[in-house]
Amino acid sequence: MKLLIAYDGSECADSALDDLTHAGLPEQGEALVMTVAEVWLPPPPPSAYEIVEMAARTRSPLGLEQKYMAGSQAVSEANQMAIRAATRFQVSFPRWKVKHSAVWGSPTWELFAKAEKWKADLIVAGSHGRSALGRMVLGSISQWLLYEARCSVRVARGKLDEPDFPVRLLIGIDGSRQANQVLAEVAARNWPAKSEVRVITVDQPIGVGSVGLVAFAMKQSVDKLNRKEKRDSEKLVRNAVTQLKSAGLRANGEVLDGDPRRVLVDLAEEWRADCIFLGATGLSNRFERFLLGSTAGAVAARAHCSVEIVRHRRRRRGVNGNGNGKPQHTGDRVS
């Protein structure tokens, strides 16, 4: 696994680091802690000697600016933050290969570009916080990455638990290929003993609002359709639970009625879940990314716990990408 951690030194960024101990990460992998300095005001002008030295090593005005900004105080401070965060991560994951990076520019673009170039499997970003207001407005960086990144994204929120409290995962599925990828991803991870998983399918039954004989005949047809949908959903959940149990997880599932955005968030809070896992439905164009906001985006913004949106990149045949000897699950690489 290649993990890109967005870090800005804030409390929610620290919570995101702590949350990774509950993310089922493998014993070994590669992590890159990245801090982006946003330079709003021009830095102090360099000395004549510094200008000459930098100009001698560059071939264009843009290259001169890049070298100058890379040595600015803002980037230096960002680098110190990245080092502290990388050290903190290394303590929790001693067998991982951990690096750090500090750059300047737009955080969203720099993180996106690095994830693409480095071929990250998962981007981790913090959210605004645990309060209701903080959850309602998902951070602009987190939300942009959630919609635009081509790999999985985890909007991480730390959760205070009692000692030995089991890791609790809530998985929302709908029978799609993307939902199957979520199940495969959760099953492949390295969860601690006694971890618990609940698989949820949320149905929205069709209703009939008119009256009379036509409505009565229509109601019979609609009821029949709803019963079939319920049976299909129950079968879907049973198969998912069997798959997770075969991976050694304690799993159960159920079919619930209502709006999935509200049901998943409320159930996660009631059950004290650590993370909600959802699949990215296609996202092959901007219209599909817009549709993500109706469910996954709303859940990520409102949930009290972490939310991970699972996407898989295509990898070359024969390359092991998950660090545990199993073939890497594959999926669409989207634009």
Image (cartoon, helix red, strand yellow):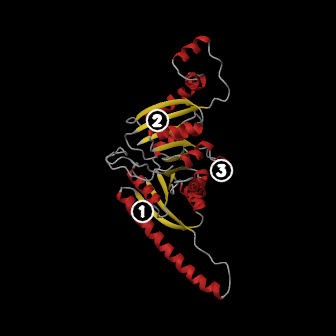
Residue 301 x/y as whole percent: 61, 51
Q: Secondary structure at mark 3?
A: helix
Amino acid on which the number 2 mark rests in the picture: Leu
Sequence-first disc among 1 and 2: 2
Residue plotted at (64% across, 86% down):
214
Residue plotted at (55% across, 17% down):
55
Q: Looking at the image, which residue sits at the far top?
A: 49
Q: Secondary structure at mark 2?
A: strand
Can you see residue 128? no
Amino acid on which the number 3 mark rests in the picture: Met
Q: Is residue 75 above or below residue 153?
A: above
For mark 1, what is the residue? 240
Q: Residues within 10 Å of mark 3 (few under 14, many from 20)?
A: some
Front disc: 1 or 2: 2
Residue 307 x/y as whole percent: 53, 50
Residue 74 x/y as whole percent: 60, 25
Asked if the residue at tag 2 contacts the one at tag 1, i.e. Cβ–Cβ closer than 8 Å, the answer is no
For mark 2, what is the residue? 32
Q: Residues within 10 Å of mark 2 (few under 14, many from 20)?
A: many
Q: Marks 3 and 2, how far apart in space?
A: 29 Å
Q: Say how many tags the image has.
A: 3
Looking at the rendered structure, which numbered label has been put on residue 136? 3
